Amino acid sequence: MRRSSRALTAALAAAAALTCSSSASAVVGGQAASAGSFPYVANVTIAGAFGCTGTLIAPQWVLSAGHCGSITGAGVATPVGWPTGAVQLTLNTVHADGTGGEQHTVTQVKLPSSYLLTHGSDVSLLKLDTPSAVTPMKIAATSERSIWEPGDQMTIAGFGTTSEGGSAPAIMNYAQVPIVTDAGCASAYHDTTPVLGDAFDATTMVCAGYPQGGTDTCQGDSGGPLLAPLSTATGGFRLVGATSYGQGCAEAGYPGVYARIAEGPLRDFIASNVPDAYAG
């Protein structure tokens, strides 16, 4: 899938066609995050070999991409998670080397049973060894649907590369991208995967990006947040998506695709395992 830093050997031609960036990239067209910002964004290292991003959604749970949590990755998607100790992560730091951050080992990985031979349902839940002292980022309530409509500006963040095939920066990057209509995203990814069918599934995916490209998540940003701003009076964000895949990084005509976690079947999966992850 798009955003993991390992080289994926795709057993399915469909999965290979979807690879826009590997799970270890940073935001394209963004800027460096300031110290103390995005404390809930996790820098995830898997098997000591590749990286992803994630979001703390409850004191002892981080949400990331399915292709990050699955031991088979995106090549042949299966809901089999990495064993205890294989996944490490750092919270509460913008430094890619973990300076000043809160270190954790993941003791359990959960994936939806629907993450099987598919590019959809691309989420995983990572249980931490100890509860984090960081305040979690709540997933948007169903009553907050109006904050992530097409055209609304979302914030993306991650530890991935700042260009397709490039290197990751020393500091987390972030940027803003607008939500794209489901119809627009379906058109962009129509017949992208001849084996699996059309790449976009509105029940488990949502898209964000500019028609001209230029700003996007990239390799290493997999699992990272798609954040909807609350009212200017209230401030803050709600989590509405997790970085999944895309055609390249920041290419014109191809918005980034994110797991749709604030509604639909992925909401049900997360709520059944981490009921306090949602606002309202």
Image: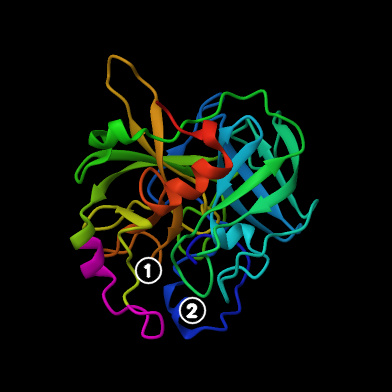
Q: Amino acid at mark 2?
A: Ala
* CA gap, disc 1 and disc 2: 11 Å
- What residue is drawn where x is 46% and y is 60%? 121
- What residue is drawn where x is 49% and y is 33%? 33
- Membership of 195 in magenta stretch: yes
Residue at the front extreme, as displayed:
272
Provide residue 8's location: percent of width, then percent of height. Answer: 60, 73
Which quadrant of the structure image shows residue 112?
bottom right
Residue segment shown in magenta: 184-197
Residue 57 in the image: above or below residue 185: above
Asked whether, in this view, residue 238 is left or right of residue 101, the answer is left
Which label was assigned to residue 247? 1
Q: Which of the pair 233/76 is nearer the observer?
A: 76
Which label was assigned to residue 16? 2
Provide residue 59's location: percent of width, then percent of height. Answer: 63, 29
SS majority, magenta: loop
Residue 146 in the image: above or below residue 7: above
Residue at the right extreme, as displayed:
85
Q: Amino acid at mark 1?
A: Gln
